[in-house]
């Protein structure tokens, strides 16, 4: 039984796949760093009392995350969803 489990795990860690990517990102800490940045963004949104909430972009998104993010366009669908969820008038990315 142990041999079968070992072979099964080895196949997933040797061959390129999402499980291998997720495992590697966990070890490198990129998933943790992404989570920290996302929580900082949420805190910024919740603390903002103005009509337009501008947030920083999150760089270095882990490859195992299939992510669409908000944009600088307030009419974009994802921006509207963010705004509705956080009960804000507008949420956009800062322009640099």
Image (spheres, helix red, strand yellow):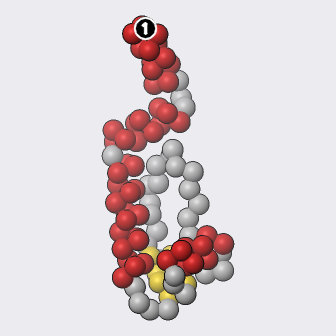
Q: Nearer the viewer, residue 71 or 9?
A: 9
Instruction: Give the residue drawn at x 44%, y 60%.
Output: 59
User: Where does the image place residue 81, in percent across and percent down from the top left?
Assistant: 60, 73
Task: Please tell me which residue is depicted at 33% across the width and 46% down the height of the picture.
Answer: 29
Residue 72 x, y percent position in the rendering: 57, 77
Disc 1 secondary structure class = loop
Residue sitting at the far front: 1
Is residue 67 visible to the viewer in this orientation of the structure? Answer: yes
Residue visible at 66% across and 80% down? 75
The answer to whether any part of residue 73 appears in the image is: no
| Percent coordinates x, y for residue 53 in the rendering | 47, 84
Residue 34 shown left or right of residue 70 in the figure: left
Instruction: Give x and y (percent) for residue 58.
Output: 44, 63
| Residue picked out by circle 1 | 1
Q: Is residue 29 left or right of residue 59?
A: left
Q: In what quadrant of the picture does the N terminus appear? A: top left
User: Which residue corresponds to the image point at 40% horizontal and 70% vertical from the top-left?
Assistant: 41
Outermost bottom residue: 50
Count how many numbered circles sit on residues in the image.
1
Above or below: residue 32 compared with residue 44: above
Q: Quadrant of residue 49?
A: bottom left
The residue carrying pointer 1 sits among few (fewer than 14), some (14 to 19) or many (20 or more) residues within 10 Å by Cα, namely few
């Amino acid at each position: 039984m142990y041999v079968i489990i070992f072979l099964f795990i080895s196949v997933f860690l040797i061959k390129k796949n999402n499980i291998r990517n997720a495992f590697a990102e966990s070890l490198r800490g990129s998933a943790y760093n992404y989570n920290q940045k996302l929580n900082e963004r949420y805190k910024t949104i919740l603390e903002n009392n103005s009509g337009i909430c501008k947030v920083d972009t999150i760089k270095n998104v882990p490859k195992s995350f299939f992510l669409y993010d908000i944009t600088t366009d307030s009419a974009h669908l994802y921006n509207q969803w963010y705004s509705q969820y956080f009960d804000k008038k507008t949420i956009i990315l800062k322009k640099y």
